[in-house]
């Protein structure tokens, strides 16, 4: 079975499980909305202040959402040894990992789709003029978060304190992509708006490097 076919099957399974219960999406969305609203009331920023502190707060909220969503990626497979069954199937190991990455990407992008308009209203930030460029930054930043988060979720899945271990492993590695994402978003929020290409190149390079590393190390990542 090809990698694309295996990834599509794993993606379909993950989407079915989540949309059947909606537990992960609902919990994450409510939590992140509370974070955004509390930040808004705590800082009560003016329009100019929102353009300065807004990018950092927005990506901090995305990081919280990712921490909640990525942890169960492989933890749910431990209950009935589902991961073992997947490994025994005649599929490429990277297909399994890629399906998980794509599922997490879909879940996080859906969360961001609902969160960004609320952020724009609360912080009085005009997003329509930069919506296309902002969508590109959000996609590249979220992809990097999902690739690294899914890989480290596979590593920490069998750890006794995996809920604590995953953020400890993940946060230092995510530092470059978080800085690049915040810088790109800050450039789009500035007056006049500009897409900072040097930081965008960092996002692209980060995504390519970690996708390649996940492909090369997928056998080790999925070993029990």
Image (tube, rainbow, N blue to C red):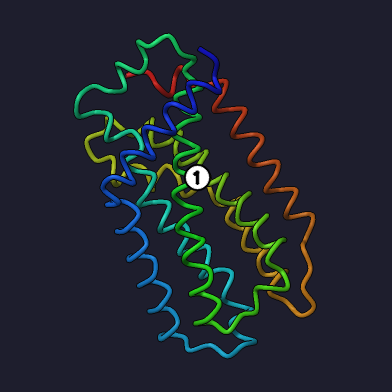
Residue beneath the point at 65% across and 87% down = 48
The tally of labels here is 1
On the image, the x and y values in percent for residue 65 come to: 41, 57
Q: Residues within 10 Å of mark 1 (few under 14, many from 20)?
A: many
Q: Residue furthest left?
A: 79
On the image, the x and y values in percent for residue 63 come to: 46, 57
On the image, the x and y values in percent for residue 10 come to: 42, 28
On the image, the x and y values in percent for residue 136 come to: 68, 54
Q: Secondary structure at mark 1?
A: helix
Q: Which residue is mark 1?
A: 105
Q: Is residue 102 above or below residue 177?
A: above
Image quarter in which the C terminus is found: top left
Q: Is residue 211 left or right of residue 83?
A: right
Q: Is residue 91 above or below residue 10?
A: above
Q: Is residue 180 left or right of residue 219?
A: right
Q: Is residue 196 left or right of residue 6?
A: right
Quarter of image, res 198:
bottom right
Residue beneath the point at 47% across and 31% down = 99
Quarter of image, res 157:
top left
Residue beneath the point at 73% across and 53% down = 200
Q: Is residue 153 above or below residue 30?
A: above
Residue beneath the point at 53% across and 68% down = 116
Q: Is residue 200 left or right of residue 181?
A: right
């Amino acid at each position: 079975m090809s990698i694309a076919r295996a990834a599509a099957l794993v993606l379909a399974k993950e989407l079915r499980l989540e949309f059947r219960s909606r537990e992960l999406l609902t919990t994450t969305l409510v939590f992140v909305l509370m974070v955004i609203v509390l930040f808004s009331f705590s800082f009560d920023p003016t329009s100019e202040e929102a353009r300065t502190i807004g990018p950092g707060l927005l990506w901090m909220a995305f990081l919280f959402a990712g921490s909640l969503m990525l942890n169960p990626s492989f933890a749910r497979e431990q209950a009935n040894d589902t991961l073992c069954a997947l490994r025994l199937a005649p599929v490429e190991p990277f297909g399994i990992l890629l399906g998980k990455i794509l599922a997490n990407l879909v879940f996080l992008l859906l969360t961001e789709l609902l969160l960004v308009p609320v952020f724009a209203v609360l912080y009085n930030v005009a997003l329509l003029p930069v919506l296309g460029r902002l969508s590109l930054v959000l996609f590249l930043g979220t992809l990097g978060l999902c690739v690294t988060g899914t890989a480290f979720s596979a590593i920490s899945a069998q750890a006794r304190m995996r809920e604590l271990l995953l953020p400890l492993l993940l946060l230092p590695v995510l530092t470059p992509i978080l800085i690049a994402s915040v810088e790109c978003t800050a450039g789009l929020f500035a007056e006049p708006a500009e897409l900072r290409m040097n930081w965008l190149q960092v996002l692209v390079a980060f995504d390519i490097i970690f996708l390649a590393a996940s492909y090369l190390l997928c056998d080790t990542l999925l070993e029990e």
